[in-house]
């Protein structure tokens, strides 16, 4: 459907599902072309017609109408000649354990779409192009709750046969069968050759009916247009191979035109009836063996200190511009000499070319003989990329992580730079907790568990403190082992936050950041999101600035705050402006 609408001049930035309402004749025309080509099943133009995806176009409140009309358009084109399948695709956002949305919430959204498609008169459902088995399970549960019509459940896979999140067919196929799918299979992402190998793997672990809907090859950009280059003859030749391997429902996904379907239909007609039932072996789908996680006290010196209740001291060092790290390594060495336990290497966007936090962390750990806290952000990486980064970090000896969602990319030197945000810090905490149990995000065993100490951020001065407390509780449930706060300026707000999270209390390291000038105090008070500086502190800095002693007053304020919060926490992180290590020592000396 998407291929044909694109070919008929609909731009990719349009909501294709909404065309059911604004250009119904065009959608109906596409359906009729596939019916005339010989399709036995046509899919409704509702792949993205859930309220989450529609909300991105401003059509969330029209979800029911779009789905009902989509089903009726296909029903009218099908007449009594072919079946109509209600097409349902992913929500376009991550659900638990990787994302903010619960499985129950996802199921409720899918129920809305299923009910509308049933109202429109579909004969069956095709749940397609899912990368997350958990989300596909929510969609399947929604169908089963409202309808007894047949369900085709299809994952989308990479060339290696595993889902885009790394789940192998030996895992997802039996699970879909267990959850009640009538037909299980794969669609989209790859061409026929790679999909055939995946089908062969599914056939060995599941006795369910199978489906295969490959793309017409990989897309190629030709003069600004994405075109799929697998010929109808080629697709038809693989349709025969799919059927000989037990596939009962065969067709195509992206790039599959009516001519492809016409050729596939001819190839299917020419085939003899399928042979005897295939042999199914389910032993390869057994759950991964349990492994013993690394005890917290054995993960790192920092982890051991927290486990024993020893007070710890940390300082932050920014990644440098360019590729020369001598200065930051020397700063870390000086911090180690003066008794700092841990160096935190922040990961946040700055204009210009800066070294990655991961690279700097490795250099400091190797050359300065001090433990490092790797500040790791979800902003610039997808889920698989983050998993790869973290496995590499573990291999290079890093054990302490601070997992954060990340700030938006600033409009600096590269104004067209974009963020990713595939998951947030709660989802990433779940990822690392799973790695610590010896499993990857696809549920496959790593052979041995990682030994990461999982840290998360907390903001006691957040404007929406209820939301901050809720997210903190979710992070702890996901596996967080300690928390690092945003800079503390309001000790009273910090005490109230601690009282709110007492039920899920984990070791907390409080950040203290001295002012070096009145300008810095005013900036923190008025321009930094999530930081609240009491007016009394700003006024103290005004008086000190007038007397020519603003830097000294800023240090005095930091010492007072550090002394006040020290009995409440298990550590302090000193964040000096411009990473002035002498300011760090000045605060620490007073606290000690």
Image (cartoon, rainbow, N blue to C red):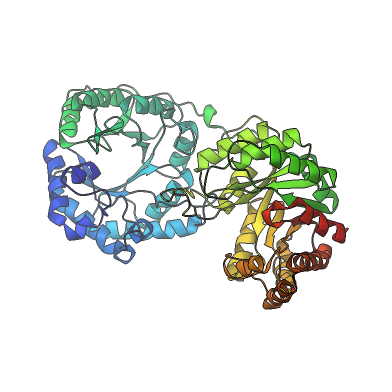
- Residue placed most toward the observer, 81 or 9: 9
Q: Nearer the viewer, residue 326 or 22?
A: 326
> Percent from the top left, x then y, of residue 384?
51, 39
371 vs 264, nearest the viewer: 371
Figure quadrant of residue 52: bottom left
Is 330 located above or below residue 61 in the figure?
A: above
The N terminus lies in which quarter of the figure? top left
**Number of callouts:** 0
**What residue do we see at 76% from left, 51% from top?**
581
Tell me the quadrant of the picture where the C terminus can be found: bottom right
Q: Nearer the viewer, residue 1 or 135?
A: 1
Q: Position of residue 147 (x, y in %)?
A: 34, 55
- Left or right: where does residue 507 sit relative to residue 33? right
Viewer can see residue 506: no
Residue 277 placement (x, y as % from top left): 36, 25
**Whether residue 306 is situated above or below residue 355 in the rendered picture:** below
Tell me which residue sits at (24%, 27%) in the image: 230
On the image, the x and y values in percent for residue 533 come to: 66, 71
Q: Is residue 98 visible?
A: yes
Q: Residue 562, located in which quarter of the rendered image?
A: bottom right
Residue at the spot 63% in from the left edge and 67% down from the top edge: 519
Indicate the quadrant where residue 367 lies.
top right
569 lies above or below 553: above
């Amino acid at each position: 459907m998407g291929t044909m609408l694109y070919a008929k001049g609909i731009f990719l930035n349009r909501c294709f599902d909404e065309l059911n309402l604004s250009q119904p004749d065009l959608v109906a025309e596409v359906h009729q072309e596939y019916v005339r080509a010989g399709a036995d099943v046509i899919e409704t133009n509702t792949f993205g017609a859930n309220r989450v995806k529609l909300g991105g176009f401003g059509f969330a409140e029209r979800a029911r109408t779009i789905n009902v009309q989509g089903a009726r358009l296909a029903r009218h084109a099908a007449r009594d000649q072919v079946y109509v399948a209600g097409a349902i695709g992913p929500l376009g956002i991550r659900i638990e354990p990787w994302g903010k949305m619960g499985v129950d919430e996802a199921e409720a959204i899918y129920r809305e779409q299923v009910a509308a498609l049933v109202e429109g008169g579909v004969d069956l459902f095709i749940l397609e192009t899912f990368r997350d088995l958990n989300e596909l399970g929510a969609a399947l549960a929604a169908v089963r709750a409202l309808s007894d019509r047949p369900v085709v459940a299809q994952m989308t896979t990479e060339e290696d046969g595993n889902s885009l999140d790394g789940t192998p067919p030996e895992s997802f196929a039996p699970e879909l069968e267990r959850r009640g799918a009538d037909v299980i299979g794969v669609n989209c992402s790859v061409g026929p050759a790679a999909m055939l190998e995946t089908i062969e793997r599914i056939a060995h672990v599941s006795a369910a009916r199978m489906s295969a809907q490959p793309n017409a090859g990989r897309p190629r950009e030709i003069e600004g247009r994405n075109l799929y280059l697998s010929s109808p003859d080629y697709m038809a030749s693989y349709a025969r191979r799919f059927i000989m391997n037990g596939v009962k429902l065969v067709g195509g996904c992206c790039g599959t035109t009516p001519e492809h379907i016409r050729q596939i239909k001819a190839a299917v007609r020419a085939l003899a009836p399928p042979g005897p039932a295939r042999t199914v072996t389910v032993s390869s789908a057994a759950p991964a063996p349990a492994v013993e996680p690394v005890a917290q006290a054995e993960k790192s010196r920092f982890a051991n200190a927290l486990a024993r209740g020893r007070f710890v001291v940390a300082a932050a060092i920014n990644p440098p511009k360019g590729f020369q790290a001598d200065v930051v390594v020397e700063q870390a060495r000086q911090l180690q000499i003066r008794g700092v336990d841990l160096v935190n290497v922040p990961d946040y966007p700055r204009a210009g070319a800066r070294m990655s936090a991961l690279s700097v962390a490795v250099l400091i750990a190797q050359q300065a003989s001090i433990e490092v806290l790797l500040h790791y952000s979800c902003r610039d990486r997808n889920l698989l990329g983050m998993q790869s980064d973290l496995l590499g970090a573990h291999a290079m000896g890093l054990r302490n992580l601070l997992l954060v969602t990340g700030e938006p990319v600033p409009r600096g030197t590269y104004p067209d730079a974009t963020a990713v945000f595939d998951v947030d810090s709660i989802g990433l905490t779940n990822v690392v907790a799973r790695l610590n149990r010896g499993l990857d995000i696809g549920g496959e065993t790593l052979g041995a568990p990682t030994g990461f100490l999982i840290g998360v951020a907390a903001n006691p001065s957040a404007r929406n403190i209820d939301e901050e407390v809720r997210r903190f509780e979710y992070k702890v449930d996901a596996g967080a082992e300690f928390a690092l706060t945003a800079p503390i300026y309001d000790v009273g707000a910090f005490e109230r936050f601690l009282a709110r999270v007492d039920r899920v209390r984990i070791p907390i390291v409080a950040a203290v950041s001295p002012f070096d000038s009145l300008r810095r105090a005013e900036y923190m008070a008025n321009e930094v999101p999530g930081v609240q500086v009491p007016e009394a502190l700003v006024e103290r800095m005004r008086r000190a600035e007038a007397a020519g002693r603003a830097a000294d007053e800023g240090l005095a304020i930091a010492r007072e705050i550090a002394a006040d919060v020290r009995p409440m926490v298990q550590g302090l992180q000193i964040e000096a402006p411009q990473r002035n290590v002498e300011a760090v020592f000045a605060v620490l000396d007073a606290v000690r």
